[in-house]
Amino acid sequence: MPSYDAIIIGAGHNGLTCAAYLAKQGRKVAVLEADDVAGGAARTVEFAPGFKVSHVAHLLTHMLPQVMNDLELERHGLKLAAKNLATTALSPDGNHLHMHGPFAARIDGGLAVNEQLAWVSLREKLLKFSAVLAPALAQTPARLKGTGLLEQRDLGALGLRIRKLGRDDMREFLRLILVNVADTLEDDLADDRLMGAIALDAVLGTHLGPRSPNSLMSLYYRIAGSVNGQQGAISLPAGGMGAVSQALQSACVASAVDIRLATPVERIIVEDCKAVGVASKSGEEFHAPVIVSAINPKTTILGLAGAAQFDTGFVRKISNVRMRGNAAKLHLALSERPKFTGVDEAGLSGRMLIAPSIDYVERAFNPAKYGKHSPEPVMEITIPTLSDPTLAPQGQHVLSAVVQYAPYDLNTGWGKGRAAFLKTTMKTLEAYAPGIGKLATKKELLSPVDLEKKYHMTGGHWHHGELAIDQMFMLRPVPPAAQYETPLDGLWLCSAGSHPGGNVMGAAGMNAAKRILKKKA
């Protein structure tokens, strides 16, 4: 009966991060992973012979510099194939908008002078306001009541950052907190291509449209992250997103973490109202005074621990956390480099968006409210092989795209609806890249149902819970568990379902580990 100081359930990037931090402080740690590969959704997969792709998460936007430095991920093999990816906002008429640098620091593509000036001003404001919230990513959120001295300090620091904006900016910051992104953009801008691209960034991976309340907060979250200290930067890891997980796994091994793959946990062992271990599906038991779940909060609370271990109010709150996936992932194995009308090789090497206007994005979202997939989906497209040729056979390529909107609860069911949505998606791609269908030797479409089945994402939502103002900060996943510790003594959470949420950043894992070390010192 193996015994440890801490057991982590799930070897996703947050689980590995939490394990590495605990082990570096001398704790004896085990990580139990259901699959035969570590990494969770940050994984590189060979989906066709010789063709590899970042299977779910495909770009690095939020990896905390603190995690990179503390765990020495570069020393453990993490390299970037491309930094500061450019973004091309595709237009049906071929008059595309080319955005360079972090969060479109420079724009080419026939943007009027007054529009350029308006964007410079709006961009500065959005970056300034998101920077106010950015430090909170690496902090344990404050409790709604009974706040400790450390949390009071962090709350005070947030208040001070808001005050330092100055009177006018402070009022504007507070005014915009709950505003939708469409209204914010339309107040200052006129170019449909630019507004569509920024609107898509705000709603990517969510069950929101650009006119949904608090969708601007989602944009703040998107651009609060930084890579190499550059706010809003987008990077591509060499070897795909699996390289991030491999570096984290190497950091864990260097600190003597016991990583057990193909060891699915069946239940959390509870004795005298305290989590004291876990039992695997094979019947083996592992014991520790600290159990940390790096998987979905609902699965953890209602499944592994069991609702009977918690009061009914807490169970009701967890049951009501919204996590309806609305994004699919498309992978294409291509026999040669595709041609997008009006896009040169530099543009192909970056990120391409199909979101030609705010109204286009909103129309794409509308059917999802009624359980239908979008007839004209929006997309975030990359061709990673142009920066990292190791992902495909010589001269061939892979295309990876996030496709919205694809509701988890599709009214036809995904068994019937998959072929129709794939056909719609390819038709949309063909409008911008004529002939791409003939180049595709293999197509893979991962629906939210597929994501739930393969990656244990309840509802097929890759953030393990909608990123909306009522499910963020001290409300994530629910107030009684917002500081990573659950009401069940000994049971902790550290997945994307906890603060600060999704994207590959390691923040939840790091924050939870620091909280555990502080309490168990």
Image (cartoon, grey):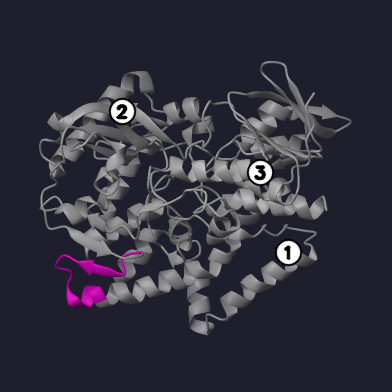
The image quarter in which residue 398 lies: top left
Residue lying at the far right of the rendered structure = 272
The residue positioned 47% from the left and 66% from the top of the image is 229
The residue positioned 24% from the left and 26% from the top of the image is 442
Marks 3 and 1 close (CB-CB < 8 Å): no
Q: Secondary structure at mark 1?
A: helix
Q: State how far apart marks 2 and 1 are (Cα).
A: 45 Å
Can residue 483 be seen from the camera position used here?
Answer: no
Q: Which residue is mark 2?
A: 444
- Is 108 contained in the magenta span? yes
Of the residues under marks 2 and 3, which one precedes in the sequence?
3
Question: Where the N terminus falls, by quadrant?
Answer: top right
| Amino acid, disc 1 | Glu
Can residue 128 be seen from the camera position used here?
Answer: yes
Give percent across and percent down for residue 516.
75, 49
Q: Which mark is residue 151?
A: 1
Give, as a single range, the part of the protein colored magenta: 103-116
Give percent across and percent down for residue 130.
48, 66
| Amino acid, disc 2 | Glu
Q: Which mark is residue 19?
A: 3
